[in-house]
Image (cartoon, grey):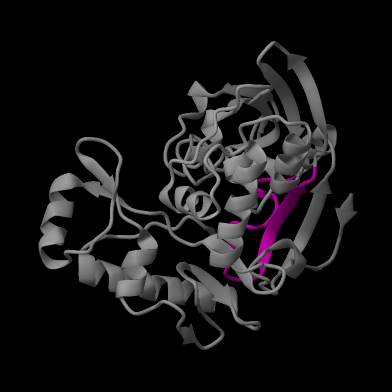
């Protein structure tokens, strides 16, 4: 489907930024996507719009990928393999899997966005990551229009990242994704402290995959604003990973500094804690600010421009760097 003239992108980004595109297309099939890629040079690829900040009006072609479909491709004694179109809503897929009693996606409940975007940043939450259930993805190379499959290993998954955010950034478009989910003997994961605590509070000692999803949704709903009501992209920054020696030095000044052990020489620091200690939690600056329940979430109070939000995010980065000597990295993709 093709839209000419100027198209408002407000409904296509969860920040609700009212910018326009001079060339906006929607690809509902792999064939349509290939055709659009052939026509246009250096397009911007748009999924669910939940992890993007437009700083200004866009004069490049934008292709929104809306390839749909969920198909069971193979069933074994313990596993089910599914192929999912890049344009499917992520949480709709999670709900579909729960109805079928397929395990593996429950910890990733209520993560905004579409399936095609999930491998790019290796989405994760509450002790689980996409890479745990990912088998492969089918892509189209933007420059050549050729198809290519990427296996789990070839995606080079790491914390909130993959090959598609690094050396192959803006070089491939994901068309569909293959997952392996459990049919039985589900690997119930409630190692994450917040999830473990809420299950304990509700006297659930042997949770099901439905229980995990239910309480993940409860935690997320409390911590994060609904983007339909308050413009936001969830976590704006990644949780920084620092050397253990740097952590020990910081601990001398900030005794309560929290951490999660990554390896023998690396720890992860909650970015929300750093931002809160810099005095930004729940603060409003003009038309933007941080969410009252979670300092890591930058919000649009209604009329913020993309540039306002961007400049505010840089103010936060500078403050954290001055106080902790830690440089925050954006999780959100900034365009413009």
Q: Residue furthest front?
A: 203
Task: Using the image, determine if residue 288 lies above or below residue 298.
Answer: below
Task: Using the image, determine if residue 306 lies above or below residue 214.
Answer: below
Res. 109 visible in picture: no
> Where does residue 285 sit, x and y in percent of width and height?
48, 86
> Where does residue 170 sit, x and y in percent of width and height?
57, 43
Res. 46 visible in picture: yes
Q: Nearer the viewer, residue 140 or 124?
A: 124
Left or right, 266 with respect to 203, comes to: left
> Where does residue 271 sit, x and y in percent of width and height?
36, 61
Left or right, 96 with respect to 332, comes to: right
Q: Write the residue at 57% across / 66% down.
A: 222
Which image quarter: residue 28?
top right
Q: Is residue 195 magenta?
A: no
Q: Write the residue at 55% across / 53% down.
A: 202
Which image quarter: residue 81?
top right
Q: Residue furthest bottom?
A: 286
> Where does residue 328 sit, x and y in percent of width and height?
35, 60
Q: Is residue 59 magenta?
A: yes
Q: Write the residue at 65% across / 82% down.
A: 302
Q: Nearer the viewer, residue 110 or 322?
A: 110
Name the image quarter holding the C terminus. bottom right
Q: How many marks?
A: 0
Q: Nearer the viewer, residue 140 or 68?
A: 68
Q: Residue furthest top?
A: 77
Q: Which residues are magenta?
A: 40-66
Task: Using the image, determine if residue 262 lies above or below residue 284.
Answer: above
Which image quarter: residue 93?
top right
Q: Write the residue at 43% across / 59% down.
A: 237
């Amino acid at each position: 489907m093709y839209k000419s003239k100027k198209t408002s992108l407000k409904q296509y980004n969860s920040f609700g930024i009212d910018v326009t595109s001079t060339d906006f297309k929607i690809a509902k099939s792999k064939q349509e996507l290939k055709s659009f890629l052939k026509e246009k040079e250096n397009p911007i690829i748009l999924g669910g719009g939940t992890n993007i900040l437009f700083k200004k009006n866009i004069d490049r072609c934008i292709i929104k990928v809306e390839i749909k479909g969920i198909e069971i491709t193979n069933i074994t004694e313990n596993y089910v393999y599914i192929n999912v179109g890049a344009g499917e809503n992520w949480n709709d897929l999670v709900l579909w899997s729960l109805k079928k009693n397929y395990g593996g996606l429950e910890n990733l409940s209520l993560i905004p966005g579409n399936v095609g975007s999930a491998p790019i940043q290796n989405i994760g939450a509450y002790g689980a990551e996409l890479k745990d259930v990912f088998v492969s993805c089918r892509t189209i190379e933007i420059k050549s229009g050729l198809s290519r499959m990427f296996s789990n290993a070839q995606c080079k998954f790491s914390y909130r990242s993959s090959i598609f955010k690094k050396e192959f950034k803006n070089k491939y478009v994901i068309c569909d994704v293959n997952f392996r989910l459990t049919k039985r003997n589900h690997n119930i994961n409630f190692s994450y402290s917040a999830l473990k605590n809420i299950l304990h509070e509700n006297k659930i000692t042997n949770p099901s995959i439905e229980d995990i999803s239910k309480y993940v949704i409860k935690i997320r709903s409390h911590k994060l604003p609904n983007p339909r009501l308050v413009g936001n992209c969830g976590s704006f920054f990644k949780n920084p990973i620092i050397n253990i020696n740097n952590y020990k030095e910081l601990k001398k000044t900030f005794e309560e500094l929290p951490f999660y052990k990554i390896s023998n020489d690396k720890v992860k620091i909650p970015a929300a804690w750093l931002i809160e200690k810099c005095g930004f939690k729940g603060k409003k600056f003009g038309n933007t600010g941080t969410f009252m329940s979670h300092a890591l979430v930058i919000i649009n109070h209604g009329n913020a421009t993309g540039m306002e939000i961007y400049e505010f995010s840089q103010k936060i980065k500078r403050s954290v760097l001055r106080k902790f000597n830690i440089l925050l990295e954006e999780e959100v993709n900034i365009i413009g």
